[in-house]
Image (spheres, grey):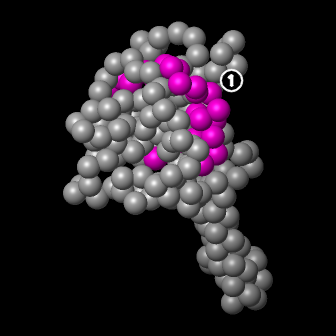
Amino acid sequence: MSRGIPSWMAVTGLTGGAMAVVTALAIQANGSPAKSPVAAPTPTTSTSRPHTPPPPPAVPAASGTGKRTVYSLSQQRVWVIPPNNGPVSTFLVQPGTVPAKVGTHYVTGRKPTGVGADGVTIENAVFFEYTAETWVAFSAPTDDKLTKPSGSLHTGAIRVHRADELKLFNNTVIGSTVVVIN
């Protein structure tokens, strides 16, 4: 997930620039604006006010209370809820091929660096479930690339961007609550 210029902004800028060039060429070809048979196209998107992205989804109501990490299988999204009503972080993740089981789990291990079962060099791993003969854990690839694992792999790795995983890692200790929902 790149955090550069939003695509809508780039398209709007390119469209506006193209319209200006076409208008200038039409005026130049006809000699004056009054004789121009070509009307300048009207932009369909206003660039006068910035686009405000919708707010992220709220923490699911049926996910408990207090400090916890909530993982939605269907949304492929995590919410990190810190203690004392601090600001909630939420972000998208790339799940592995072995899904976590729905329910309440507890962090059983944390590992600052390592190599995942898929051979990816990772950091800030947070283990919370052992199922289908594999560990399910959140972790960040050190190259920060979230790629969908091959269907032939047997991995419970839930990949998270490095900045987001650091929030999750810093909010958990052994025994912290992880709630998995559909």
At 47% from the left and 11% from the top, the residue drawn is 64
Give x and y (percent) for residue 3. Answer: 64, 54
> Could you say whether the residue bearing mark 1 is in a helix, strand or loop?
loop
**Where, by quadrant of the figure, is residue 26 drawn?**
bottom right
How many numbered discs sit on the rendered protein? 1
Residue 147 appears in the rendering? yes
Horizontal relation, residue 81 to residue 24: left or right: left
Q: Callout 1: 10 Å neighbours few (<14), some, many (20+)?
A: few
Give x and y (percent) for residue 151. Answer: 24, 55
Tag 1: residue type?
Pro
Q: Does the segment drawn in magenta span residue 172?
A: yes
Horizontal relation, residue 166 to residue 107: left or right: right
Residue 35 appears in the rendering? no
Residue lying at the far right in this picture: please name it: 32
At 75% from the left and 76% from the top, the residue drawn is 34
Q: Is residue 39 above or below residue 81?
A: below
At 63% from the left and 62% from the top, the residue drawn is 10
Give x and y (percent) for residue 28. Answer: 74, 87
Q: Quadrant of the N terminus?
A: bottom right
Q: Which residues are magenta?
A: 159-182
Q: Is residue 87 above or below residue 5?
A: above
Horizontal relation, residue 44 to residue 136: left or right: right
Q: Does the segment drawn in magenta span residue 15?
A: no
Give x and y (percent) for residue 121. Answer: 50, 58
Q: Quadrant of the C terminus?
A: top left
Foreground of the two, 175 or 72: 175
At 37% from the left and 37% from the top, the residue drawn is 136
Residue at label 1? 87
Foreground of the two, 4 or 94: 94
